[in-house]
């Protein structure tokens, strides 16, 4: 038995077998490290921060472009002519972008996130919204000459949405909002590119 014990002890020495070293305990984070980690913030804005910036007002006689560059090189079509093309259809959306010219009738006074287009031949102004809420226009552009590129649709909006638009308009004019009843048939333009020119004086 003594021989076996000595043999085993000798093998441990020859092979260098040792008990595994104890794992070093992870030091507790110092107060400075903890404060530094808390101060690190993840930027998850995804580049949308600029969308909340309001567009600067235009000066009389000034022109400005909003959104993407125009993709259509041809001159714009008059709004009334374009609406006449689709007037008989109850609901539709243009497959390809169109480019129209008209005058701005009203503008959202909160952000410039929508406006309406009108001409003397158009009874109901056409509402224009920016694609994906991606940009705003100047809020002082009522009466401006507009060239708008995007897709046109004839659709039905809910009573709630129509009332919301009416209240936006009333906030601008200071008058009591029109009371909307039921769904409303309307033309809507989803714009990707806009050029506005504010008249002189």
Image (cartoon, rainbow, N blue to C red):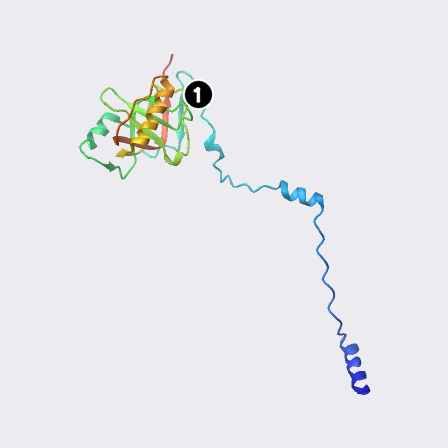
Q: In the depicted view, which residue is nearer to us: 186 or 61?
A: 186
Q: For the view shown, which residue lies furthest in the left direction?
A: 88
Q: Report if residue 32 is visible in the image.
A: yes
Q: List x then y, in percent, for residue 78.
A: 25, 25
> 94 above or below 57?
below
Quadrant of the rendered image containing residue 97: top left
Q: Is residue 139 left or right of residue 43?
A: left
Q: Residue at x 79, y 77 (%)?
A: 13
Q: List x then y, in percent, for residue 115.
A: 35, 26
Quadrant of the rendered image containing residue 76: top left
Q: List x then y, in percent, for residue 74.
A: 29, 31
Q: List x then y, in percent, for residue 17.
A: 75, 74
Q: In the depicted view, which residue is nearer to us: 30 or 146?
A: 30
Q: In the depicted view, which residue is nearer to us: 65 or 154?
A: 154
Q: How many marks?
A: 1
To which residue does mark 1 refer?
57
Question: Which quadrant of the figure contains the N terminus?
Answer: bottom right
SS label for mark 1: loop
> 141 above or below 113?
above
Q: Residue at x 49, y 38 (%)?
A: 47
Within 10 Å of disc 1 (Cα), the crowding (few <14, some 14-19, many 20+) is: some
> 103 above or below 68?
above
Quadrant of the rendered image containing residue 112: top left
Q: Is residue 70 left or right of residue 10?
A: left
Q: Report if residue 153 is visible in the image.
A: no
Question: Which quadrant of the figure contains the C terminus?
Answer: top left
């Amino acid at each position: 038995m003594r021989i076996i014990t000595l043999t085993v002890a000798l093998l441990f020495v020859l092979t260098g077998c040792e008990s595994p070293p104890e794992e070093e305990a992870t030091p507790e984070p110092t107060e400075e490290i903890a404060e530094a980690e808390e101060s690190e913030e993840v930027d998850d804005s995804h580049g949308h921060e600029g969308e909340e910036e309001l567009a600067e007002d235009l000066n009389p006689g000034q022109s400005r472009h909003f959104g993407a560059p125009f993709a259509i090189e041809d001159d714009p079509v008059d709004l009334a002519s374009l609406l006449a093309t689709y007037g008989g259809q109850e609901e539709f959306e243009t497959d390809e972008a169109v480019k129209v010219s008209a005058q701005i009738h009203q503008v959202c006074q909160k952000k410039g996130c929508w406006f309406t287009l009108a001409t003397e031949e158009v009874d109901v102004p056409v509402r224009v919204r920016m694609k994906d809420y991606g940009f705003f226009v100047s809020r002082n552009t009522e009466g401006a000459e507009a060239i708008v590129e995007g897709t046109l649709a004839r659709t039905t909006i809910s009573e709630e949405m129509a009332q919301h638009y009416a209240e936006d308009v009333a906030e601008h004019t200071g008058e009591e909002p029109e009371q909307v009843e039921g769904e409303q048939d309307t033309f809507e333009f989803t714009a990707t590119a806009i050029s506005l020119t504010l008249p002189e004086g």
